[in-house]
Amino acid sequence: MITMIDGIGIDIVELEDIKKRMNEAFLKRILSNEEYQRYLSINDLGRQIAFVAGRFAAKEAYTKAYGVFETPLMFSEVSITQSENQKPVLKSQYRSLDICDVSISHSEHYAVAIVVLQKKDQ
């Protein structure tokens, strides 16, 4: 089975913008249940902001990699978890057979994410 790159999405987010928007409604709209539980376990406000910003950037990059979804994409139904070696893993019910590689990075003021979409040749 051959895979080929079918889309690339990238997004950058200012941490200060996320900080201003962080309230319960925003968090519930952006984070999956699993991500929300991880968010609650983080005790440092700066790390919480970076966590949310990274997830937001990754989900924006995911939408850009696809361009269009057949049904509306709900960010709370997309989850960025970690593999055993701490690599980000994107889980989504949308087109679940596709392979989506994701990378997230943070600096003092920004979070950036890239998603590379691979489709299996059938």
Image: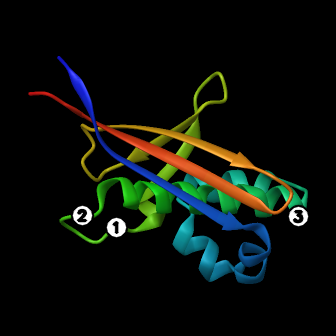
Badge 2 amino acid: Phe
Residue 98's tag is none
Q: Residues within 10 Å of mark 1 (few under 14, many from 20)?
A: some
Q: Amino acid at mark 3?
A: Leu
From what the image shows, is residue 22 above or below residue 50? below
Q: Amino acid at mark 1?
A: Leu
Q: CA distance from mark 1 to mark 3?
A: 28 Å
Is disc 3 in contact with disc 2, using a CB cutoff of under 8 Å? Answer: no
- Residue contact between numbered discs 1 and 3, judged by CB atoms under 8 Å: no
Which residue is identified by label 2?
Answer: 69
Residue 41, percent across and down? Answer: 79, 52
Q: Secondary structure at mark 2?
A: loop
The foreground one among 107 and 51 is 107
Q: Identify which residue is drawn at 52% across, 59% down.
A: 32
Residue 18: which quarter of the image?
A: bottom right
Residue shown at 68%/61% (left/top)?
52
